[in-house]
Amino acid sequence: MLRRSPLFGGKNRVTFSLPGHEPAGRVSVVGDFNAWEPGRHEMVRRRNGTRTVSVVLPPGEHRFRYLASDGVWLDDDTADAVDGGGSVVRVTARR
């Protein structure tokens, strides 16, 4: 699940969220905003049973996927789009 929070300067905080139990092990959000580097934005387990990580993104279209510790790639069906290249989140400047 994705949640956007507008920030000053046209940027947005995008919070990526998955259930806390699936997939098993550590999960990172990787995408064009972090050079597809695993572990840079690792999801953290929360008390509400989810795991999340927030990333500040500039306006534009950003591709991402989730990478589980066992090498499994996952897409986000709540993203703005999903295709063969993964998931897409579109960030618009605050007005």
Image (cartoon, grey):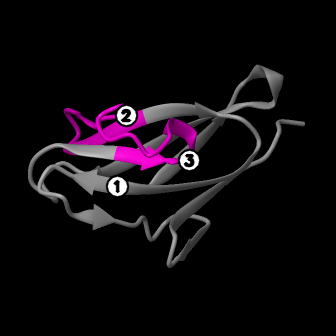
| Residue at the (32%, 41%) spot, across then down | 38
Which residue does the numbered mark 1 point to in the structure image? 66
Please state which of residues 19 and 60 is positioned toward the viewer in this rendering: 60
Q: Amino acid at mark 2?
A: His
- Per the model, the C-alpha gap separating discs 3 and 2 is 12 Å
Above-or-below relation of 74 to 28? below
Q: Quadrant of the N terminus?
A: bottom left
Horizontal and vertical percent position of residue 39: 29, 35
In the image, is 32 to the left or to the right of 54? right
What segment carries the magenta color?
A: 29-53
Image mark count: 3
In the image, is 10 to the left or to the right of 13? right
Residue lying at the far top in this picture: please name it: 8
Which residue does the numbered mark 2 point to in the structure image? 41
In the image, is 28 to the left or to the right of 37? left
In the image, is 43 to the left or to the right of 78? left
Q: Amino acid at mark 3?
A: Asp
Residue 49's image quarter?
top left
Comparing labels 1 and 3, the label whose residue is closer to the camera: 3
Horizontal and vertical percent position of residue 91: 71, 47
